[in-house]
Amino acid sequence: MKKKVEDFVEQKGKTSVELSDVNELKKKFLSKGGMEKDIKGYEVTTCFGGAGCPNTTNSCTRLGKNIEKIIEKENILSFLKENVKRDLKFHHEFRVALSDCPNACSRPQIVDIGIIGSVLPGIFDEDCTLCNACVDVCDENAITLDEDNVKPLINYHQCLMCAKCIKVCPTGTSGEKEKGFRVMLGGRLGRHPRLAMEIAGLHTHDQVLSIVQKSLKFYKENSKNGHRFSHILSSVDQILT
């Protein structure tokens, strides 16, 4: 809603938001059909990692642009107008959120498709100095030091693939093993909230685009009268098969 208010104020030629603007927009949206002309059928949200966030793990900027191109071609707005038998509202829109790291500021866990830029760390042959930097920086307590074999040990069940350990390692013992994106499907808020279901593993740029295309196909084939993607999706296997 915050972005909608800002856009509304910008359209009026103003540079700051006042309470009267919020009330005007609220009145407009609560009126019959008041939202419909502002709805484009989908929303693609990114975090501010591209602006230089120090937590960036794997940038989603190019991926986000390519996803938006795919969704635009699917013409979701026309699909919604044909299938929703009442006024369109923002909750009808198909939502994608991308985050450049597991901090997930864009909240990818509660939208139709959520994507998190990730890096799987690995242990390489460079000599470890047992400096403890990787252990100290890991918020998940996923790293311990094997002093007998002089190397770090990574518990991948706890690792969130944020790459902090890689960034602080002075020797290169901890390094990038695999780079890609985590993908989650079917999250939502509302009366019956649900966290998105994650597809196992890391996915390449092209694999993510393929998942998005399959998800949109499934959505358009199965959504009736405005049913959200999350309400018709019970398992990620429905997309992968």
Image (cartoon, grey):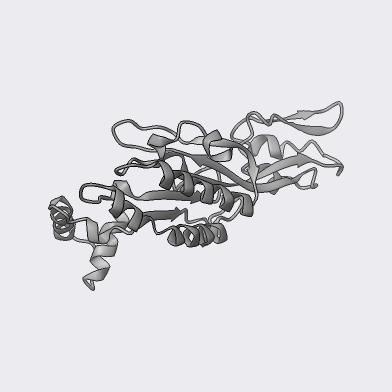
The one of 150 and 75 positioned closer to us in this rendering:
75
Residue 31, position as x, y percentages in the image: 12, 53
The one of 144 and 238 positioned closer to us in this rendering:
238
Task: Give the vertical position of 227 relative to 194 (above or below).
Answer: below
Task: Give the vertical position of 193 relative to 176 (above or below).
Answer: above
The one of 209 and 180 positioned closer to us in this rendering:
209
The single residue placed furthest to the top in the displayed view is 148
The one of 122 and 240 positioned closer to us in this rendering:
240
Measuring 23% from the left and 57% from the top, which residue is drawn there? Answer: 36
Task: Give the vertical position of 217 relative to 16 (above or below).
Answer: above
Q: Is residue 217 at least partly visible in the picture? A: yes
Q: Give the quadrant of residue 7.
A: bottom left
Measuring 23% from the left and 47% from the top, which residue is drawn there? Answer: 85
Q: Is residue 107 at least partly visible in the picture? A: no
Q: Give the quadrant of residue 127.
A: top right
All told, the count of numbered labels is: 0
Q: Give the quadrant of residue 241.
A: top right
Measuring 40% from the left and 49% from the top, which residue is drawn there? Answer: 95
Measuring 86% from the left and 44% from the top, which residue is drawn there? Answer: 126
